[in-house]
Amino acid sequence: MQKNNITKKQHYIPQVYLRGFSREYKPLKKFDDDKRYTVFSYDLLSNKQIEQAIPIKSICYEKSIYELRDQNGDLINVNYLEKTFGILEIEFSKYRRKLERKAYYKENLKIRYFLDRDEREFWQSYITFQILRLPQIVKGAKEEAEKVFSGIGDKYSTYEIDSFAKMSLFPFFREIGEESIEYKVFSAIFDSMDRMNIAVGVNKNGRLITSDKTISIDTEIFPCDEYKSLFFPITSTLCVMFAGEEYKDTITNNTLIEIDDEWCDDINRSIVNSSFGKVYSSYKLSGEYFSDKR
């Protein structure tokens, strides 16, 4: 069994992402010591604001959630998914900095094509992977795999089924074609954004918040041709936004737009209502976002 260099605390919300909602975060400033980044946390289950800011290293992780095991439960390909996500997170940092270099200039509000094709594809891909790596999705995939394998008898152990489920979620283990499970899973999320209008919203007052889900999606069915809306705050000042169906005309496609505090509050409420129970911010929150939490 491989035991060397196992990352036991595996973050399903990356620390590099959470930095953007930290009081210590400064756009375009390099500051890599995660121990010094902190966020305020609001617990929706207890309806309680944690009074002291907490280190981002201490939240949004589960023990060995991305590890693979053989039929005996021994670890295989140790840290493979964790390292792969690490590469993706480096790219996230690069693309976020690319937005920060141009999002704070008023003259860019007039640009007709704010994002190039590569940027749009990256943000759609990153959002897709962020959804797939959530614990609720990983565990749901295992439950579905158990149903599939239930008719086979005891040929495969629960460890192997768990590993199969993870390998089916992420297209990192083999070359994939359009008929593969991995392709179909990825496309079910990614393709729904293709037809939507995209914009980057900027709130210079730094009021945007995030959660233990990070993303808010409004849709009545899944999979679908397009969602009604999707919000993905990437810092307390920047949000990647998609609008579709009856909301498509609310944003002009591929533009930079200003988010006033009223609009920001609407986005924050959607993030709260989509969360699994924890909300994170660079400032202490009051109860204005939580009265209509389902």
Image: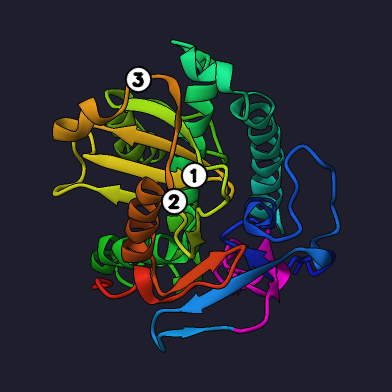
Q: Which residue is mark 2?
A: 132
Q: Secondary structure at mark 1?
A: helix
Q: Which residues are magenta?
A: 51-77
Does residue 173 show up? yes
Callout 3, which amino acid? Asn
Q: Residue furthest top?
A: 112
Identify whether 208 is placed above or below 126. Answer: below
Quarter of the picture holding the C terminus: bottom left
Q: Residue 130's x, y, as percent?
A: 49, 49
Callout 1, which amino acid? Phe
Do tag 3 and tag 2 residues touch (Cβ < 8 Å)?
no
Figure quadrant of residue 40 = bottom right
Do tag 1 and tag 2 residues touch (Cβ < 8 Å)?
yes
Q: Which residue is mark 3?
A: 253
Q: Which residue is mark 1?
A: 129
Q: Secondary structure at mark 2?
A: helix
Do tag 3 and tag 1 residues touch (Cβ < 8 Å)?
no
Identify whether 291 is placed above or below 196. Answer: below
- Give whichever of discs 3 and 2 has the lower sequence position: 2
The colour scheme applied to this rendered structure is: rainbow
Characterize the local packing of mark 2: few (<14), some (14-19) or many (20 or more) Cα atoms within 10 angstroms.
Answer: many
Q: Residue furthest bottom?
A: 46
Q: Secondary structure at mark 3?
A: loop
Q: Nearer the viewer, residue 112 or 164?
A: 112
